[in-house]
Image (spheres, rainbow, N blue to C red):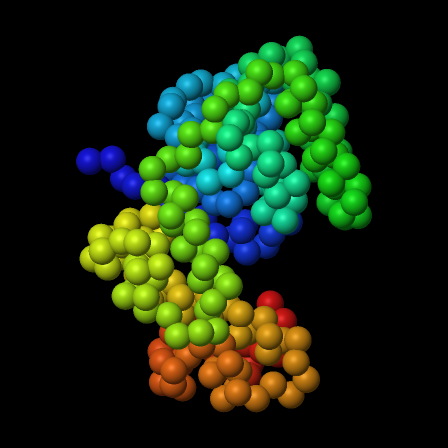
């Protein structure tokens, strides 16, 4: 049986433009709420995007639509530039990509090479101002949209529901949330919704909700002078100190006050 993809939340949480050079990354099937571009600079890589497999070589680009399931494996080796465009930036293109998108494999090597300096500049200059980063992204995405024929956007089954649930949790984690309530919001039987969520996220619904609460509590504490732990616990949706400590201990082996001071 094929393994179901997992949700990769760190890019969504960062919500920025990330750019780096990678070599021989063997990446299992996963998804996130970002647009991802991979420029193959050397070698060969086997790719799969939304269930369609293909091979890319030097000067080809892989385009991954927001929430597209994608996987990579060296064939036998490759290097590439990676750009991951967080939701805050990719929302600029939401109107375009809602019903249509770019092909996953962009194979006009001659044209792609005209964009290579922009990928290289983003990778080389790590501290570019946000507006300059956005300028490079707009040039790259705009040029690709102008050059390549678009195809209908076909999101994978159920991913839209999962992403909607993740967004709902982000917006309502301070409130009482339960499997019964969320399954009702999205119109599913609670047992089916629980299995669906767990299969994509790799975590139970309640476990994920409490992880979001821990993350946001810590972020809030680090922005607050002399934070009051009890106030933060209940303000961030936990129903008791016991529940907070049990979930906090899953991620940290230090007491909360020490984590708050670490700023990391």
Residue 132: percent from left, percent from top: 79, 41
Asked where in the image residue 20 lies, by quadrant, the reply is: top right
Which residue is pictured at 59% across the width and 54% down the height?
14
Which residue is pictured at 57% across the width and 16% down the height?
149
- The number of numbered discs placed on residues in the rendered structure image is 0
- The quarter of the rendered structure image containing the C terminus is bottom right
- The quarter of the rendered structure image containing the N terminus is top left
Q: Observer-nearest residue: 50 or 72? A: 50
Which residue is pictured at 35% across the width and 59% down the height?
185
Residue 156: percent from left, percent from top: 37, 35
Which residue is pictured at 51% across the width and 68% down the height?
215
Can residue 122 be seen at all in this image of the molecule? yes
Residue 115: percent from left, percent from top: 71, 23
Can residue 22 be seen at all in this image of the molecule? no
Asked where in the image residue 240 lies, by quadrant, the reply is: bottom left
Up/down of 25 relative to 167, above or below: above
In this rendering, position of residue 215 left or right of residue 245: right
In this rendering, position of residue 83 left or right of residue 25: right
């Amino acid at each position: 049986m094929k393994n179901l993809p997992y949700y990769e939340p760190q890019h969504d949480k960062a919500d920025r433009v990330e750019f780096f050079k990678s070599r021989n990354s063997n990446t299992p099937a996963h998804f996130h709420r970002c647009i991802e571009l991979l420029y193959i600079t050397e070698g060969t890589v086997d790719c799969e995007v939304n269930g369609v497999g293909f091979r890319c070589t030097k000067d080809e680009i892989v385009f991954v639509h927001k929430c597209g399931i994608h996987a990579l494996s060296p064939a036998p080796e490759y290097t590439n530039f990676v750009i991951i465009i967080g939701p805050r930036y990719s929302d600029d293109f939401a109107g375009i990509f809602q019903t249509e998108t770019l092909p996953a494999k962009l194979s006009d090597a001659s044209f792609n090479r005209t964009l290579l300096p922009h990928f290289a500049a983003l990778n080389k200059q790590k501290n570019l101002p946000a507006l300059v980063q956005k300028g490079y992204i707009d040039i790259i995405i705009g040029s690709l949209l102008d050059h390549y024929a678009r195809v209908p956007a076909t999101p994978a089954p159920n991913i839209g529901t999962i992403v909607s649930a993740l967004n709902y949790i982000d917006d309502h984690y301070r409130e009482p949330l339960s499997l019964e309530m969320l399954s009702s919001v999205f119109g599913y039987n609670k047992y089916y919704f629980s299995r669906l969520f767990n299969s994509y996220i790799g975590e139970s619904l309640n476990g994920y909700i409490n992880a979001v609460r821990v993350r946001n509590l810590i972020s809030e504490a680090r922005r607050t002078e002399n934070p009051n732990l009890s106030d933060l616990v209940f303000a961030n949706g936990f129903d008791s100190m016991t529940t907070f400590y049990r979930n906090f201990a899953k991620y940290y082996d230090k007491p909360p006050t020490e984590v708050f001071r670490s700023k990391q």
